[in-house]
Image: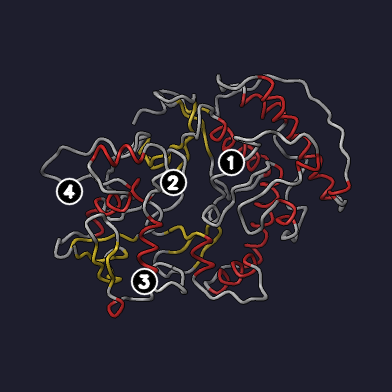
């Protein structure tokens, strides 16, 4: 099956696909390198790998059941049927001689189907171009879906188990950034999800557009050869600078992100959870993307460390393998204000909304969070964290107003 890989209406190359939606071959001699997606220079089959990574992971939510129900052969087949469309960039594939244009299919302006069930509800209108879904290119292992809520494009995310913890953590992270007066973050609100074991998912607005697209740190660091004597972190900074970004501004952003992740014990800031925004016309890097996907923090699906030594030994999937090594990347340890953090009572109050979580677990999370703040304060004072002994202070639980963090039923109406 022959398709044209396009960037909006500009041709990148011709691609042959197999029946299962995977790339058979692409025409290297016809490729337009300036328009091609950033990719791993060391991989001659980069487009095959790029397409495979672009497809929704089979482990995400109920994807496997949905694919079987629809008779699709796998995630790449799902992506192919939806023309490779995404809400994070302007790449797509057009069937040869189809006559389709970017205006016809782009999902930043055209309607699409998609709900928390993923991939249900295609249009039955025969006289219109079919409604595609951007969920075929949606990354991550959590159950999630792009949606149109009150005419606004955004994402609904679920959780890994019967608890609402990861969705609640996204709201806690949003609160932290808001208190800091930090603008470059994605705001999440809780949203009631029916028909699931967990009570709440979370919702966030789309922050990309036809003129502003998302490029992951993974694509950035693999797009240029990394020297042996330079860290992946510094390589990332340097490549971003090559594409026009202010590296001083980027360092300040990265410092803040690392420190806020430390306070929340975030351990999932892998290189697809760090991204930059690129101008889709001149292809220059504009700025770091707003901080997103902070849900895997506050000891979710794990025990709360019993002592400070264990609290400082949390492994991370990021530019370094643990939190202490991540802190060594920070240039300005004072770019996060320790006096402007969510109170323990706020964290415990949010967790109290989850009907599946018991009070003992909530108290342990609150205690671990409070201890982490104290450790962060010591770090800012220049103390050696490995030598610190810490005694826990407890705060009394106070009631919390939830009107600004939960989407009401009336708001959910489209």
Q: Is residue 12 left or right of residue 329?
A: left
Distance from label 2 to label 1 (Cα)? 20 Å
Give the crowd class for mark 3: few <14, some 14-19, many >=20 residues within 10 Å: some
Which residue is the site of mark 2? 206
Which residue is the site of mark 1? 296
Please state which of residues 357 and 293 is positioned toward the viewer in this rendering.
357
Q: Earlier in the sequence, mark 4 or mark 1?
A: 4
- SS under mark 2: loop
Which residue is the site of mark 4? 129
Pinpoint residue 140: horizontal percent, then vertical percent.
46, 47
Distance from label 4 to label 1 (Cα)? 39 Å
108 over 45 or under it: above or below: above
Image depth: mark 3 or mark 1 in front:
1
Give the crowd class for mark 2: few <14, some 14-19, many >=20 residues within 10 Å: some
Please state which of residues 328 and 26 is positioned toward the viewer in this rendering.
26
Distance from label 3 to label 1 (Cα)? 34 Å
Distance from label 3 to label 2 (Cα)? 24 Å
Which mark is on residue 115? none
Q: Are marks 3 and 4 in contact (CB under 8 Å)?
A: no
Distance from label 4 to label 2 (Cα)? 23 Å
Residue shown at 55%/19% (left/top)? Answer: 355
190 over 83 or under it: above or below: above
Which residue is the site of mark 3? 35
Residue 117, quarter of picture: top left
Q: Earlier in the sequence, mark 3 or mark 4?
A: 3
Q: Earlier in the sequence, mark 3 or mark 2?
A: 3
Distance from label 3 to label 4 (Cα)? 26 Å
Q: Are marks 4 and 2 in contact (CB under 8 Å)?
A: no
Residue 396, quarter of picture: top right
- SS under mark 3: loop
Tell me the quadrant of the picture where the C terminus can be found: top left
């Amino acid at each position: 099956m022959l398709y044209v890989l396009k960037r909006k209406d500009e041709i990148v190359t011709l691609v042959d696909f197999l029946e299962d939606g995977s790339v058979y071959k692409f025409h290297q001699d016809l490729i337009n390198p300036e328009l091609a997606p950033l990719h791993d220079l060391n991989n001659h089959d980069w487009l095959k790998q790029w397409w495979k990574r672009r497809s929704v992971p089979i482990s995400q939510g109920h994807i496997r059941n949905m694919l079987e129900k629809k008779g699709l052969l796998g995630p790449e087949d799902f992506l192919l049927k939806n023309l490779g469309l995404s809400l994070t960039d302007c790449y797509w594939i057009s069937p040869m001689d189809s006559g389709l244009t970017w205006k016809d299919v782009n999902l930043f302006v055209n309607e699409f189907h998609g709900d928390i069930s993923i991939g249900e509800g295609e249009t039955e209108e025969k006289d219109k171009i079919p409604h595609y879904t951007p969920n075929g290119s949606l990354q991550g292992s959590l159950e999630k879906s792009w949606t149109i809520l009150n005419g606004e494009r955004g994402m609904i995310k679920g959780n890994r188990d019967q608890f609402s913890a990861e969705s609640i953590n996204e709201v806690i992270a949003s609160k932290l950034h808001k208190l800091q007066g930090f603008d470059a973050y994605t705001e999440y609100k809780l949203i009631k999800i029916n028909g699931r074991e967990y009570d709440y998912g979370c919702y966030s607005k789309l922050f990309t557009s036809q003129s502003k697209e998302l490029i992951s740190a993974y694509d950035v660091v693999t797009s240029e050869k990394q020297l042996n004597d330079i860290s992946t972190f510094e390589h990332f900074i340097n490549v971003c600078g090559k594409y026009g970004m202010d590296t001083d501004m980027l360092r300040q952003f990265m410092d803040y992100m690392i420190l806020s992740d430390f306070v929340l014990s975030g351990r999932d800031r892998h290189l697809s959870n760090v991204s930059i925004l690129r101008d889709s016309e001149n292809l220059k890097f504009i700025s770091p993307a707003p901080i997103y996907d902070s849900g895997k923090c506050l000891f979710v699906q794990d025990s709360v460390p019993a002592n400070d030594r264990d609290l400082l030994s949390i492994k991370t999937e990021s530019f370094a393998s643990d939190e202490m090594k991540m802190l060594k990347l920070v240039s300005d340890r004072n770019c996060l204000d320790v006096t402007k953090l969510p109170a323990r009572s706020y964290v415990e109050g949010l967790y109290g909304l989850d009907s599946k979580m018991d009070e003992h677990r909530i108290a342990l999370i609150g205690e671990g969070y409070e201890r982490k703040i104290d450790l962060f304060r010591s770090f800012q004072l220049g103390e050696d964290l490995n030598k610190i002994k810490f005694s826990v202070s407890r705060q009394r639980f106070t009631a919390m107003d939830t009107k600004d963090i939960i989407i009401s039923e009336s708001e959910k109406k489209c």
